[in-house]
Image (tube, rainbow, N blue to C red):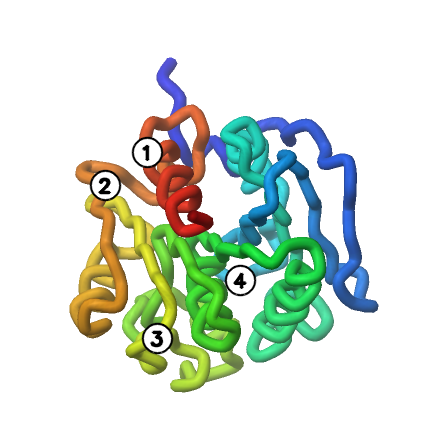
């Protein structure tokens, strides 16, 4: 029986990180640090429609693969819809706190976010000027036909919560998206990059779906890891 990349959500957890760091006083304000000996650091933000149902565990597999590539990672947990203080703007506030904490670990950062985490990563890049690799990102929540949008914003999406509405961003941006993504449409990224006026790059993964880019057992994952390495310079 062939494996689906979506199985990354239910795969057994990867080996635990040796260090778990609190970046704030709330129970869910923490991240797993996996060192790799270099001086750059990738700050990863998991997706899951901003819901408390999903956590940082599934993105840990990508973190392990990045460590094997020589890239240190800070896999961030944050308050989500269903958690006290989660949703807008609490989830984003947590991400900004996490980035501030990451700056104490390394001066060379890159933000990496998948799906709803890609949305938060793009917003954080606009605020912090940290380069970003946004994977299958919800770049324009107002045009994503998913009930999770209203749950996250507590109603209609707000312009200040839309990466698309912030364009152009004065920071390096690479968007990676599967052309057959049936969760977050590929059109989210094509429209964003078109509107970015040359400030964002799109890497289209032909025939790929939503989870292949973050599944180390899928070849698409190597493209994401390459983009991260390139932005870390």
Marks 1 and 2, the one that precedes in the sequence = 2
What residue sits right under mark 3 in the picture? 169
Instruction: From the top left corner, tell me how far across and down residue 116 is, in percent.
Output: 46, 60
Distance CA(mark 1)–CA(mark 3):
26 Å
Label 3: element kind: loop
Q: Residues within 10 Å of mark 3 (few under 14, many from 20)?
A: many
Q: Which residue is mark 2?
A: 205
SS category of the residue bearing label 2: strand
Q: Earlier in the sequence, mark 3 or mark 2?
A: 3
Q: Earlier in the sequence, mark 3 or mark 4?
A: 4
> What kind of element bears circle 1?
helix
Task: Locate residue 180, reporting x and y percent.
Answer: 22, 44
Instruction: Look at 66% across and 59% down and name the residue there.
Output: 102
Evaluate if marks 2 and 4 touch, with contact meaning CB atoms under 8 Å apart.
no
Contact (CB < 8 A) between labels 3 and 2? no
Which mark sits nearer the N-terminus, 1 or 4? 4
Real-space Cα distance between discs 2 and 4? 24 Å
What residue does disc 4 label? Answer: 50
């Amino acid at each position: 029986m062939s494996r689906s990349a979506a199985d990354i959500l239910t795969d057994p957890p990867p080996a635990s990180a040796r260090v778990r760091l609190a970046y704030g006083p709330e129970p869910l304000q923490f991240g797993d640090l996996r060192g790799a000996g270099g001086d750059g650091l990738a700050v990863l933000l998991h997706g899951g429609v901003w819901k408390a149902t999903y956590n940082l565990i599934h993105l840990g597999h990508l973190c392990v693969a990045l460590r094997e590539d020589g890239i240190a990672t800070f896999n961030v947990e944050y308050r989500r819809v269903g958690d006290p203080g989660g949703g807008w703007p609490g989830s984003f506030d947590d991400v900004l706190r996490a980035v501030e904490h990451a700056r104490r670990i390394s001066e060379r950062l890159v933000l990496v976010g998948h799906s709803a985490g890609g949305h938060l990563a793009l917003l954080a890049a606009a605020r912090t000027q940290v380069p970003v690799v946004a994977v299958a990102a919800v770049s324009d929540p107002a045009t994503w036909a998913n009930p999770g949008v209203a749950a996250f914003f507590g109603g209609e999406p707000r312009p200040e919560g839309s990466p698309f509405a912030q364009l152009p961003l004065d920071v390096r941006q690479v968007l990676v998206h599967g052309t057959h993504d049936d969760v977050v449409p590929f059109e989210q990224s094509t429209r964003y990059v078109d509107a970015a006026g040359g400030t964002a790059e799109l890497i289209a993964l032909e025939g790929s779906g939503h989870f292949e880019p973050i599944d180390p057992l899928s070849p698409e994952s190597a493209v994401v890891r390459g983009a991260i390495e390139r932005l870390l310079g």
